[in-house]
Amino acid sequence: MMQFVRYTQNGPPEWGVQASESIHRLSALPGGGPELTDLCGDSYRESIAAAIETGALPTVDAGGVDRLAPVPVPGKIVAVGLNYRDHAEEQDAEIPESPLLFSKAPTAVTNPGAPIVHPEGIDDVDYEVELGIVVGRTARNVDAGEAREYIAGYTVVNDVSARDAQFGDGQFFRGKSYDTFAPMGPALATGEEFDPDTAELRTRVNGAVKQHSDTGQFIFGVDELLEYVSGVMTLRPGDVVTTGTPGGVGIFRDPPELLEPGDTVTVEIEGIGALTNPVVDET
């Protein structure tokens, strides 16, 4: 498995490969950083591994860079609701027979470490740890058995949600789409070594664990979702499909435990990393 990262260090955004405490700079290659289509096959990753092995890529200290979302402006964000059995159970909802799709505005994306802005006039801001699928090749009517060929990699997404807007509107779009409501990162995991259907997930708010589950709770796995979504709409490189959240969200706790300015929320997926963002007032 490789972890590709976008970052800045006193200059323009760059791509690199995380390796322990260092990042190998892909800007040193003749073509610079990868296109998402490059990450769909083994050959590009093999060439990068060879360059790392021979010392052809300079490194920077991983702790000395500012991480960026791997996809800063997705063409679209297709989200899947009610896709974990434990999340359905916590709200006494029936298991859906087919994936429930909704959308988040691409402008909701923000970087690791950047603030989540608590909108003025909104009371119920919630967290949701989600596995994000980053599409690397144009996909239309993809068979589930070939779905992995269209995936550039996987990242962590915090599907921040204004529950009062969501429930008040009777649909998801506004409540999911406020600016900063889609923190994404800290890396893009690629390669067959990462199994998206067995990954452990956690959410911590101010250090306290709020969600702890694994993608074995999926109702619809990654391959099924790519088949279903691509049967509805064409997916293009840079589109992101978020795969739902497990149980433990704030709104269904008794009493509800929602995000407030001053909080720090961390969503983490085994094999990808931890994505941390502070919550601030809208100014």
Image (cartoon, rainbow, N blue to C red):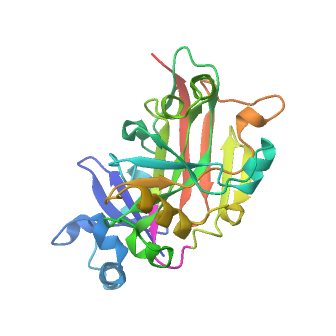
Q: Which residue is drawn at 56% across and 37% down?
A: 160
Chain part drawn in magenta: 188-194
Image quadrant assignment for residue 252: top right
Pinpoint residue 94: horizontal percent, then vertical percent. Answer: 76, 49
For image coordinates 35% across by 53% down, the residue present is: 7
Horizontal and vertical percent position of residue 185: 47, 52
> Can the viewer see residue 21?
no
Depicted 237 relative to depicted 126: above or below: below
Up-down: is 31 above or below 10? Answer: below
Say whether residue 191 is magenta. yes
Residue 128 in the image: state x and y as whole percent.
62, 43
Q: Residue at x 58, y 73 (%)?
A: 195
**In this view of the protein, which residue sits in the foreground, 107 or 64?**
107
Closest to the observer, 179 or 175: 175
- Depth order, front residue of 21/252: 252
- Is residue 206 visible from the viewing direction of this image? yes
Please give the name of the residue rendered at 31% of the width and 84% of the height, measured from the top-left corner. 43
Would you place residue 47 above or below residue 131 in this image? below
- How many marks the image carries: the answer is 0
Residue occupying the far right of the picture: 254
Q: Nearer the viewer, residue 19 or 248?
A: 248
Q: Is residue 86 magenta?
A: no
Q: Where is residue 91 in the image (x, y as percent from the top left)?
A: 78, 41
Q: In which quarter of the image is the C terminus?
A: top left
